[in-house]
Structures are given as C-alpha cells and as structure tokens.
Image (tube, rainbow, N blue to C red):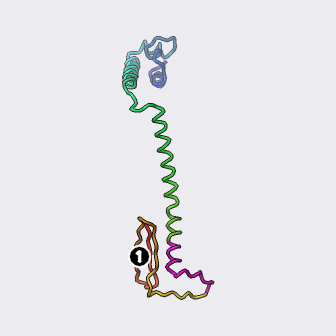
C-alpha cells in the first residue's frame, strides 16, 4: 500500500488499525511508514481528546425533560406560523367589516349601479378591547384608509 492510498483509509480506520495492531494492509503500512504513523498517532490523540471532552460534558436537564421542551417549542412554533399565516386573511376580513359598517350597512350594489354615500359623516368603527385603529385620509376625499391593529 502506498501513502496516498493509506491516507484515504486512515480517517475511516478503527483504532486497532491506526495503532498497527491488526493484520491488514493499512496496519502493515502504518507500522512501516513513519509519516503515515505520525498521521495515525495524531488521529488517535484527537479521538482520545474528543472522548475525554464528551465524557466531561453533562446535560443540564434530563433527556426526557429536554425532549418534552423540544416538543412544546415545536408546537408553539407551528401555532405561531398558523397565526401569522391567518393574519392577512383576518386583517382583510376586518377591513371589509369596517368598510361595510362605515358604509352605513348598505348592501353591495349591482354592477353599474351607483351607491350614494354620505361622506360628511365619519365612518363608524368599533374595535375590541385592547385593539386600536388608525384612520388615514388620502388626497382623494372619497378614499379613507382604516387600519386595524
């Protein structure tokens, strides 16, 4: 086995092969080649350091509690996504309701039929407790924007 081929196998080799203890072409090469032996020793050192670090790490919470927390967070995220997805539809429905109420409760006209609206009277807007609205007048006196938030 040549060094180029051995280097490809070193990252996947088990510790026995890296130490040269097994009867395999890679073990034989590691025993005979100082350069590949140095690479194998470095890999073994790093694996040992990793094992020691992993052994010293202790979880802050038990696994069952961590799983339950993760489940609750996932559930809250899905609810939040659902509410954010519904927000535009709810806003549009609220705006439509405000426009209907602001229109004096008139039913929609047939196509081509004019609607008489008293623009002198401000639109009637009712909100739920804690909800706020903003009324914006535009350059066109026939258009008023009502924003509910």
Nearer to us in this view, 62 or 33 = 62
Task: Name the residue: 51% across, 15% down.
Answer: 25
**Between residues 3 and 23, which one lies in front from this camera angle?**
23
Q: Could you say where residue 30 lies in the image, as x and y percent from the top left?
A: 43, 15
- The residue depicted at 43 percent of the width and 82 percent of the height is 122
Element carrying mark 1: strand
Q: Can you give x and y, in whole percent of width and height, for residue 36 in the image?
A: 41, 19
Q: Does 82 appear above or below 98?
A: above
Q: Left or right: where does residue 81 sit relative to residue 49? A: right
Which residue is the site of mark 1? Answer: 135
Circle 1 crowding by C-alpha within 10 Å: few under 14, some 14–19, many from 20: few
Residue 50 is situated, as x and y percent measured from the top left of the image, at: 39, 25
For image coordinates 46% across by 75% down, the residue present is 125
Magenta region? 95-112
Q: Residue 41: horizontal and vertical position, in percent?
A: 38, 18
Give the quadrant of residue 34.
Answer: top left
Looking at the rendering, which quadrant does residue 15 occupy? top left
Quadrant showing the C terminus: bottom left
User: Above or below — where is 144 with respect to 62?
Assistant: below
What residue is drawn where x is 49% and y is 45%?
74
């Amino acid at each position: 086995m040549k060094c180029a081929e051995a280097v490809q196998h070193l990252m996947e080799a088990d510790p026995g092969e890296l130490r040269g203890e097994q009867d395999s072409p890679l073990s034989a090469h590691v025993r005979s080649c100082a350069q590949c032996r140095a690479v194998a020793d470095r890999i073994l050192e790093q694996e040992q350091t990793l094992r020691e670090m992993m052994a010293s790490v202790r979880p802050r919470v038990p696994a069952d509690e961590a799983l339950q927390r993760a489940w609750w967070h996932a559930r809250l995220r899905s609810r939040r996504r659902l509410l954010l997805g519904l927000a535009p539809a709810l806003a549009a429905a609220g705006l439509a309701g405000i426009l209907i109420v602001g229109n004096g409760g008139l039913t929609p006209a047939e196509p081509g039929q004019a609607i008489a609206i008293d623009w002198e009277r401000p639109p009637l807007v009712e909100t739920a407790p804690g909800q706020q609205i903003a009324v914006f007048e535009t350059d066109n006196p026939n258009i008023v924007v009502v924003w509910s938030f």
